[in-house]
Image (cartoon, helix red, strand yellow):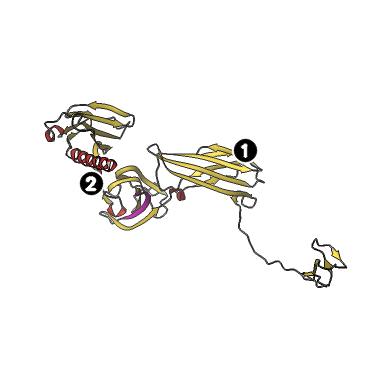
Amino acid sequence: MKKLLLAVLVLLGLQIQAQTCDTITNTYLSIGPDTIEVKSNVYDVWPNLFVIHSYDYYDNSGVTFIDTARHAFIPTPDPNIADTFSICSWDDFPFVAPWNCFKCDTFVYHSGQWNMLQYQSLQTPSCDSLTISGSQYQIIIESNALVDYWTTGAPTLTCPNVLGEDSSSTIHSVYNYNTTTGLPFDTITTCITYYVNGVYTYCCVDWVWDANMWIRVGTQTTPITNICDSITYWTDQSQGFNIGLDTTGIVYNPDSIEIWWAVCTNGLCYSEQGMYAYFPQVMTSDTLKVSYDVYIYENGVIVEVCTMEEWLVFDQNSFSWVLLNMNPTSINEITFNKINDGRMYDMLGREITNVTLGTMYIKNGKKYIRTR
């Protein structure tokens, strides 16, 4: 009964805490290039309570500014050093409640000014929500929500010409120019990668210039349940064994990647770390077991681990390392020629001429026991 009462009191306390914190809001009166003016309503909604209030400013190096004023002027960071930072309000009610209220707003520097991300109003990003504007040369593409990775290229399908890339933004800037012809492309493709409910999704939109504006002509969406499917490795023909990670087809733009290699041959294994590795111990006559562990980081946290293990042999015809074919090439039934010559053998396979009573023996491929 006591445990039940305690649980009820805890739930009631959490509900009161949520109701209390929901009444506290921060109003940003001005957002300038160097200073952001913000005001809290905590003293208006709780005028008779003693409140400890402060504004904390966070960037990549942690808390760098604290202001206890209700109406504060908070300096912004140098956008060349940190293009994203957060302002958090912290309110404590020491004499009436065992909790405090903590709220954060994030600002991103774009197009020469600081913009606040309204996470509460954001929807799930999608290619259907993308809008395009601008001229044939200078293009702005916007999303209804934060996109992890943007890329726009031309022509469509393979997109060998990358025209623009962005990450962790709702706006994507593209300069459309064909270096071969000196003219802009009239058909381009924009692809975005976003993470929702534990699944990476990759979608692309084709745009066509109709002499006045860009028009959407197609959308393709593909869920990516495993980002590891978009990476592979390469080898070369040089002396020893050179191997490296191939990320040209990766569908996500991580903060960093850590790779550990292992190569085994002739009963010995060797390890290296890095985007590529060299193993001088390997000969082209060897059969190799090659493996890697790829750790993909986002904001200092591992978001995916990719592993691979394959067997390779050196093909003298193509002068390259190829996969060892471990599958059977054909299956044939083995046939036996049965000889019924009447000879007798004991259970050890020795030929005999006389069989004693009660003894088991073999004759013409069959077992017998002499009973008389």
Neighbour class for label 2 at 10 Å: few (<14), some, many (≥20)? few
* Residue 180 position within the rendered picture, expressed as x and y whole percent measured from the top left: 40, 48
Answer with the quarter of the image where residue 52 lies.
top left
Measured Cα–Cα span from mark 2 to mark 1: 56 Å
Q: Please say if 301 is above or below 154.
A: above
* Residue 360 position within the rendered picture, expressed as x and y whole percent measured from the top left: 79, 66
**Horizontal relation, residue 79 to residue 277: left or right:** left
Magenta-drawn segment: 196-209
Question: Which residue occupies 38% across, 54% down?
Answer: 223
* Amino acid type at mark 1: Pro
Q: Nearer the viewer, residue 280 or 347?
A: 347
Answer with the quarter of the image where residue 11 lies.
top left
Question: Which residue occupies 87% across, 68% down?
Answer: 354
* Residue 337 position within the rendered picture, expressed as x and y whole percent measured from the top left: 77, 70
Q: Nearer the viewer, residue 248 or 229?
A: 229
Q: Which mark is residue 304?
A: none
Is 195 one of the magenta-colored residues?
Answer: no
| Label 2 secondary element | helix
Q: Please say if 204 is above or below 239.
A: below
Nearer to us: label 2 or label 1: 2
Is 201 one of the magenta-colored residues?
Answer: yes
* Amino acid type at mark 2: Ser
Whether residue 153 is visible here, answered yes or no, is: no
Q: Which mark is residue 121?
A: 2
Locate the N terminus by quadrant: top left
Q: Nearer the viewer, residue 21 or 346?
A: 346
Query: For the stretch drawn in magenta, what is the main secondary structure?
Result: strand
Locate the C terminus by quadrant: bottom right
As drawn, which residue projects farthest toward the right? 353
Q: Residue under circle 1?
A: 280
| Label 1 secondary element | loop
* Residue 71 position within the rendered picture, expressed as x and y whole percent measured from the top left: 16, 29
